[in-house]
Image (tube, grey):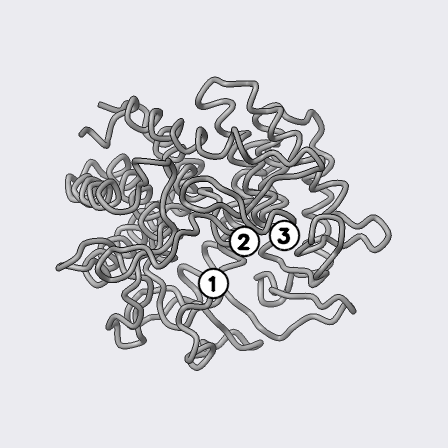
Amino acid sequence: MNFFSKSFLLDHSQSIIDFYAPRCCDPAGGFYQNYYDDGALFDNDFRQLVSSTRMVINFCRAATILKQPNLLNLARHGLTYLESQHWLEETNYYAWTRNHNTVLDTTQQAYGYGFVLLCYAHSLQHGLIESDAKIYHVFNLLEARFWQSEQQIYADTLSAEGVLDSYRGQNANMHLCEALIAAYKATQDAQFLQRAQLLAKRFCFDLCDNEHGFIWEHYTPQLTPDLEYNKNDPKNLYRPWGYQPGHQTEWAKLLLQLNALEKNSDYITKAQHLVNTSFELAWDKKQGGLVYGLSLDLMCCDNDKYFWVQAESFAAAALLYQATADETYLQYYEKTWQYCWQYFVDHKHGAWYRVLSEENTPFNNKKSEAGAKCDYHTLGACFDVLEGIAELS
């Protein structure tokens, strides 16, 4: 199997789309977001903002890369739901979760806004919409609600009552960096690239752990590392304790995408360190795959294997191979794909499993859940490799 080939990546991307496209569209609005392994639905009415936006992004990118413009019809269906159901005109807030027609949670999350911004950027770039107005609208909301001008990062959470939480973290800022890169590509407005570069500078250099060169997850309001945050919850979906190898490699991928837009050798050097160290410390030498969490002394603290960690890591390795021509990164890419092909890809029903145990067995038969997985990372990683490498063998 030649994992580093255009035909393989296109075929595999198509297989993921084929799992979702025939069954995702709710005629009453939006997308179904909860699937068992065989594609059967559960909890049909529950919707979460991140999955709602990510599925639009999936279909926008697929329409262009797979040369299937009909997929924009699915993307448009999802965008209509975002604008009519998640966006609450009376408060100018986004509903974080809905039970279809009922708003459940109106907590405002910068993480969610990042995916709304990313959704509009891809919608414009791939021809779903014609105006950039919504990109600027979301960016201005982020400026007003989350941007901390003195600290030069985004805060995370605004309560339904308008109170800003004291928590500061890298995860929302990482995905906002991703969204700002896409906003720049869609509009060519330099302010978006400059803000993405600033976030990369803050988290990958200024605020980075000087001893290990890894990126911290959680911070106090004064931006000192909060080493106790969620210490008893290492499996937290959005804010796990410890170092996250998948976030190290995901930042590496973003640094390489920034370097492709505006050359900066520091980005390549840092990306190499993040990828090399992650594969050295987090690769399970017995069972294969990258583990979920490392403790502060760089020992494994969560040996589960998550789909997104593997996907972001093979994408980062591929882009590093492109940037450096170092065969080490091709080897990282191929061994990660070989592992995923054997254990994560569902060859019977399509798409990927979400989480595997240390022994590489699924914990349950839920393939995708609202807010947790819609194969955004796996599909996106394939697309990032296809877009980032000029000539695939």
For image coordinates 34% across by 34% down, the residue present is 385
Q: Is residue 263 visible?
A: no
Kindly identify which residue carries mark 3. 46
Mark 1 vs mark 3, CA separation in Å: 17 Å
For image coordinates 72% across by 49% down, the residue present is 140
Check the picture and name the quadrant holding the N terminus: top left
For image coordinates 41% across by 68% down, the residue present is 235
For image coordinates 42% across by 48% down, the residue present is 367
Image quadrant where residue 123 sits: top right
Total numbered circles: 3
Q: Amino acid at mark 1?
A: Leu
Mark 2 vs mark 3, CA separation in Å: 10 Å
- Residue 208 position in % (x across, y down): 39, 66
The tag earlier along the polypeptide, 2 or 3, is 3
Q: Residues within 10 Å of mark 1 (few under 14, many from 20)?
A: few
Image quadrant where residue 163 sits: bottom right
**Local SS, label 3:** strand
276 versus 151 height, above or below? above
Viewer-side residue, 83 vs 17: 17
Viewer-side residue, 106 vs 181: 106
**Image marks 2 and 1: residues in contact by CB distance under 8 Å:** yes
Residue placed furthest toward the left: 286
Q: Amino acid at mark 3?
A: Phe
Kindly identify which residue carries mark 2. 371
Q: Residues within 10 Å of mark 2 (few under 14, many from 20)?
A: many
339 versus 6 height, above or below? below
Mark 2 vs mark 1, CA separation in Å: 9 Å
- Residue 200 position in % (x across, y down): 46, 54
The tag earlier along the polypeptide, 2 or 1, is 1
Q: Which mark is residue 237?
A: 1
- Residue 22 position in % (x across, y down): 52, 29
